[in-house]
Image (cartoon, rainbow, N blue to C red):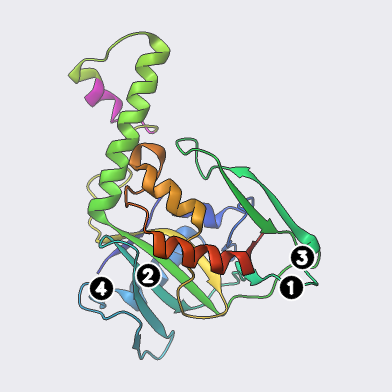
Amino acid sequence: MKIKITNFGKRHFDSKFGGTKILDMTVEEFEKAINEDLSWIDLDTCKKGEQINMLLPEVVVHEGYAPFCKLIAIKNFTDARIGSLPITLENYQYIRSGYSARRDSELPVFSRWLELPLGKPKAEWLMLILYSKEQIEKEWRADLENKINTYENDHGSVLTKEDREGLKKLDAFKYEFEGVDFDYGVVAILGQSYSTEEPMKPETMIRNALGVKEGGSGVPLDKEKYLNSVDFWSKNCTVK
């Protein structure tokens, strides 16, 4: 198995990012480390929650919310901090909320987070959220179509087939993994105090249900999972 860090996943290596940050390693160093530890794992045969005994680090594999998604919990080997905490009387006063989008192609959604005055503890685990190569390319094609439509609307013209192909060569339009051999791409990294999976946030489920054109994955909303998510995130909060 070969793993790459997607452009979207690289936000975790930016000091300005609000979620889990990895600032003591470069993207390339982190990518090399996880490939050395995880390259022999076959995610298609691992059972949900299976513990894999390794010298360093320990690993737990989880099935994702769709066939193209896999989760790997790996012992934290970076300086990444915890990404969420239970809401308590002591930290309730530090909860903030607002509308935000993770990238320009997404609709802003309502979310809330903790802004603690004294920082946050180091994470014990890193939860890697992986998407298959096929899903990453599918979402890129949908995003590309959105960008082309926007370009045509802004310029009041319809691009020819040749012009469309030419746009794919520009940095803002091209496929990030053109000619790259890989199996899964990291789209998110969560710092946690446990190796079990946190429920996907309700706002993320809604975004996914809106489809790839709105920045989601196109997976329909599951009412039971949504209600379980609401229950968890009513008692817990992201830490920025």
Residue in the foreground of this view, choosing between 62 and 38: 62
Residue found at x 39% / y 10%: 155
Q: Which residue is mark 3?
A: 92
Q: Which residue is mark 2?
A: 71
The amino acid beneath tag 2 is Leu
Q: Residues within 10 Å of mark 1 (few under 14, many from 20)?
A: few
**Marks 3/4: CA–CA distance:** 39 Å
Residue found at x 32% / y 33%: 144
| Secondary structure at numbered mark 1 | loop
Can residue 169 be found in the magenta stretch? yes
Q: Residues within 10 Å of mark 2 (few under 14, many from 20)?
A: many
Residue in the foreground of this view, choosing between 48 and 7: 48
Image x and y of residue 161, in percent: 18, 19
The amino acid beneath tag 1 is Thr
Judged by depth in the image, the label closer to the viewer, 1 or 2, is 1
Which label sits on residue 88?
1
User: CB under 8 Å between callouts 4 and 2?
Assistant: no
Which label sits on residue 43?
4
Can residue 94 be found in the magenta stretch? no
Image x and y of residue 59, in percent: 39, 82
Image x and y of residue 38, in percent: 33, 76
What residue span does the magenta drawing correspond to? 164-171
**Marks 4/2: CA–CA distance:** 9 Å
Quadrant in the rendering for residue 174 = top left
Which comes sooner in the sequence, label 3 or label 4? 4
Residue in the foreground of this view, choosing between 28 and 117: 117
Image x and y of residue 47, in percent: 27, 81
Judged by depth in the image, the label closer to the viewer, 4 or 1, is 1
Residue found at x 54% / y 42%: 101
